[in-house]
Every structure is written in C-alpha cells, then in structure tokens.
C-alpha cells in the first residue's frame, strides 16, 4: 500500500491493546497493513504488524507505554510507513454508546461530551478510546472519524432483559444492562448466514465471544434478546481479569470470615 493510495484506518482500542487495520478503498474494500500494540500499561509492551501488499511482517518489544504514548507511537509509525495523508477516514470501535448512540455515527464535539460524561460506565476502555479520537483530531483535524458502538447490537433487547433489579429511578439515569461485544456478534450473525444459511441464522441461536473478555448472547431472528454482560463488561461469565457474576452474599460472608 503506497502513500498515493487512499485508505480507511480502523482502530480498536482495548483495555491493554490497540489493534489497527488499513483498508484500501474499493468495492469491496481490501485489508492491507494491520497489526497491534499489546500489553499497554504492563511490562513487556509489544508491537506487531503484517503488510500483505509488501509481504512483510514483524513483531518486537517496544517501550513500556501507557495508552496515549502507545497511540503516539502508532501514528508516528504509520506516518513514516504510509503517510497519514493517505488516510481518508478513521473508524473506531467504541465500547459503549450509552442510551443515546446506537448506530455508527460521525464523531462530533457533542458526542465526545456525552462519551466523557459516561466514561465511568467503562473506565478501562472509554477514556483511552477518547484519547485515540483526540490524538487524531490534533494531528489531522479535518479527517472524518466514525464511531461504531459495541453496545448497539443489544440496544433493542426486550425491556425485561435490559432492566436491573434496582430502583427504577436509576434506569432513568441510564443505568441498565447494555451488553457488549456487539460488533463481534453482528459479524457472527453474518458468518452464520454464510456458513449455515439464512434459515438457521434466523432461528434461536446462542453465540459466544471467547477471549480475554468473554460473553454469550441469545439471538432470535438475527437480533439480540439477552446477553450475559450487564451495565459494564465485568458482568457475566468469568474472564481473564474479571470475575464475572458473583453471589452478593459472598461479599458479606468473606467480610465476616476473612478478618
């Protein structure tokens, strides 16, 4: 992929990683240079990339970066390799759009204000994702950026699946079950159509997103009707650094016995 070729940059800012991919614009778009920075905020931060158009790949250790420093490293590296001027737009995976943002949406100052307001919903993800947006705006202020929300797939769950067993006044403040990994589930539904056919994909299906973060979703007619994660990504099944759901009585028991 040369500097003269237009492309779209996609970014997935996780709790300890930044994944990126460049797509050559066309019908269909073609994925080119892609990679990730891993173990951000931990010892042993690493950087890896694969460039199928140049038949090049590499993986190496880099400085122990925080999220902002890792993002600066990535943008400097991309500028040197392909020239940031060849990027025509940026797409972001955003963990939570709250109650107001469901569909892919061009990022505006108003949206950023709302994402900052709800950043406590997902403190391991939203602040670093907002940093990525801000850094691109600083370097390329006229570049369009689009947010795609991981909660969007679940926003039309039945109300009984969204409400929490707490006073209803909190629901009016946006405290409800959002569900996550929605972009992954949307992809899985598309793949199910391709592999098993439309009839199977439109039936009753249990989908699993298994990785450092893990969740399950019940899908009917290609739409989410329930999911294991809740108000934050910490709920549901046990994961790498998250306990998942715990019996509330366990806290009382440990407080009484582990003294």
Image (spheres, helix red, strand yellow):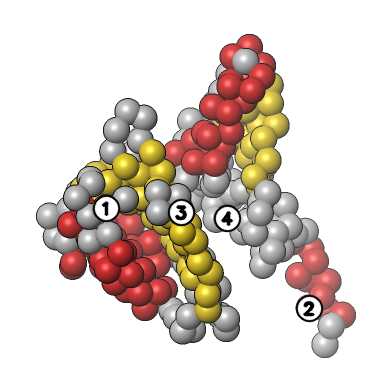
Name of the residue lying farthest toward the top: 199
Q: Nearer the viewer, residue 241 or 169?
A: 241
The answer to whether marks 2 and 1 mark residues whose Cβ atoms lie closer than 8 Å is: no
Is residue 38 shown above or below 237?
below
The residue lying at 79 percent from left, 63 percent from top is 249
The answer to whether marks 1 and 3 mark residues whose Cβ atoms lie closer than 8 Å is: no
Select label 1 or label 4 by which is in front.
1
> Which part of the image, by quadrant, shows the C terminus?
bottom right
* Dot 1: element: loop
**Where residue 87 sits: x, y (%)?**
23, 52
Q: Residues within 10 Å of mark 3 (few under 14, many from 20)?
A: few
**Label 2 to label 3, Cα distance in Å?**
57 Å
Instruction: Residue under label 4, please give it.
Output: 233
Q: Nearer the N terminus, badge 1 or badge 3?
A: 1
Q: Nearer the viewer, residue 222 or 169?
A: 222
Name of the residue lying farthest toward the left: 142
Instruction: Residue under label 1, please give it.
Output: 2
Q: Is residue 42 visible?
A: yes
In the image, is 16 to the left or to the right of 93? right
Instruction: Residue under label 3, please give it.
Output: 55
The residue lying at 54 percent from left, 27 percent from top is 190
* Dot 2: element: helix
* Dot 3: element: loop
Instruction: Residue under label 2, please give it.
Output: 255
Q: Residues within 10 Å of mark 2 (few under 14, many from 20)?
A: few
Select label 4 or label 3 by which is in front.
3
């Amino acid at each position: 992929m040369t500097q003269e070729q237009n492309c779209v940059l996609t970014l997935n800012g996780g709790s300890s990683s930044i994944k990126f991919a460049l797509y050559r614009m066309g019908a269909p778009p073609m994925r080119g240079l892609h990679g990730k920075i891993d173990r951000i905020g931990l010892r042993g931060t690493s950087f890896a990339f694969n460039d199928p158009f140049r038949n090049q790949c590499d993986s190496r250790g880099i400085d122990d970066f925080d999220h902002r420093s890792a993002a600066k490293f990535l943008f400097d590296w991309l500028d040197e390799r392909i020239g940031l001027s060849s990027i025509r737009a940026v797409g972001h995976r955003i963990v939570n759009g709250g109650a107001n943002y469901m569909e892919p949406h061009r990022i505006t100052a108003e949206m950023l204000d709302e994402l900052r307001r709800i950043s406590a919903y997902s403190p391991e993800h939203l602040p670093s994702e907002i940093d990525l947006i801000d850094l691109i705006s600083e370097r390329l202020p006229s570049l369009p950026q689009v947010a795609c929300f991981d909660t969007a797939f679940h926003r039309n769950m039945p109300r009984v699946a969204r409400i929490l067993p707490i006073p209803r006044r909190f629901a009016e403040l946006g405290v409800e079950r959002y569900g996550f990994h929605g972009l992954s589930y949307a992809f899985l539904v598309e793949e199910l159509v391709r592999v098993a056919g439309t009839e199977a994909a439109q039936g009753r299906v249990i989908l699993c997103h298994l990785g450092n973060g893990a969740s399950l979703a019940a899908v009917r007619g290609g739409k989410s009707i329930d999911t294991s994660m809740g108000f934050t990504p910490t709920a549901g099944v046990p994961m790498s650094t998250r306990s998942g759901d715990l019996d509330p009585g366990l806290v009382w028991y440990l407080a009484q016995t582990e003294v």
